[in-house]
Amino acid sequence: MAHLRTTVWGPAEFVGRPPRRLVGEGILAGTLGVGAIVGTALFGAWAGRPSLADGEAGLVCAVTLALYLRCVGAGRALVGIAAVLGVCLALQVPQAAAGVVLAQRGQVESAVVTSVENGRGTGGGRGRYLCSVTDAEGLPLKVRIWRGCERTTRPGDVLAVVYDPLGRVPQRGAGTGSGVTGAARDLAPWAAALVAVSLVAVVRSHRISPSPAPS
């Protein structure tokens, strides 16, 4: 049972409070991991780098953090949890990064609704409606808008749409909670959980006795 606990959750060979060095190392590892995942997506959205903006680089950062935790001797369960949290964060970041870019340099224009569809049957989310719209020149937008698209919205109605003048992020409906504050609120739980798990993983990796030789 002791060997199983050590393998799954880490040895944690200390009495009383965990060593401060490990606490600092765990917080630093988690913070750097979160910063890399979020930072690469934000830079990619701002600079128009699809490979970074789409979260692919964030997935690499999440795997790198998990490998680091495994190398320091963290328990397999904690490494797995950190990997899952890192992947979830990487998948959440692209939308948040696009919202930050639009909040900083986006411009608002009017768009005319051409059709309204219930997003429940299209994977758009429960109770969410999706509006197909055209811009001021009558050209249809490639993305459907859900912010401002309500059950009472009808074709011919006008919605406010935010677009990037540089064309590096897709348009979206204008609404509250979609800027820096909204992005921070959406990502904060995932980021805090990843830092906390990284901290626990590094602290529990502490070993006084020499590691047993692999059989």
Image (cartoon, rainbow, N blue to C red):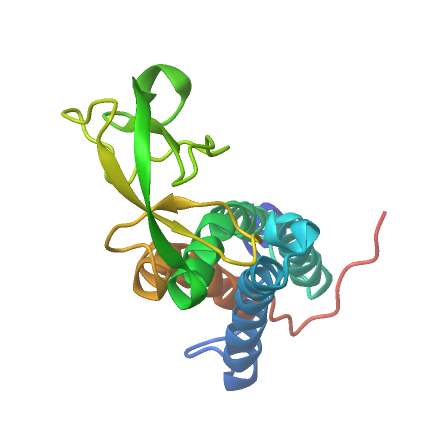
The residue depicted at 58 percent of the width and 71 percent of the height is 32
Q: Where is residue 158 in the image (x, y as percent from the top left)?
A: 24, 37
Count numbered badges in the picture: 0
Q: Where is residue 49 in the image (x, y as percent from the top left)?
A: 67, 56
The relative height of residue 66 versus residue 142 in the rendered view (above or below) is below
The residue depicted at 49 percent of the width and 53 percent of the height is 93
Furthest-front residue in this view: 137
**Quarter occupied by residue 136:** top left
The relative height of residue 83 versus residue 181 in the rendered view (above or below) is above
Of 210 and 160, the residue lying toward us: 160
The residue depicted at 34 percent of the width and 60 percent of the height is 179
Of 138 and 164, the residue lying toward us: 138
Q: Is residue 127 left or right of residue 40?
A: left
The relative height of residue 190 versus residue 160 in the rendered view (above or below) is below
Q: Can residue 134 be seen in this view?
A: yes
Quadrant housing the N terminus: top right
Of 164 and 4, the residue lying toward us: 164
Q: Can residue 12 be seen in this view?
A: no
Q: In this view, does 66 lie to the left or right of 177?
A: right
Furthest-left residue in this view: 152
Q: Position of residue 186 (x, y in %)?
A: 35, 54
**Quarter occupied by residue 13:** bottom right
Furthest-top residue in this view: 121
The residue depicted at 62 percent of the width and 59 percent of the height is 44
Q: Where is residue 20 in the image (x, y as percent from the top left)?
A: 50, 85
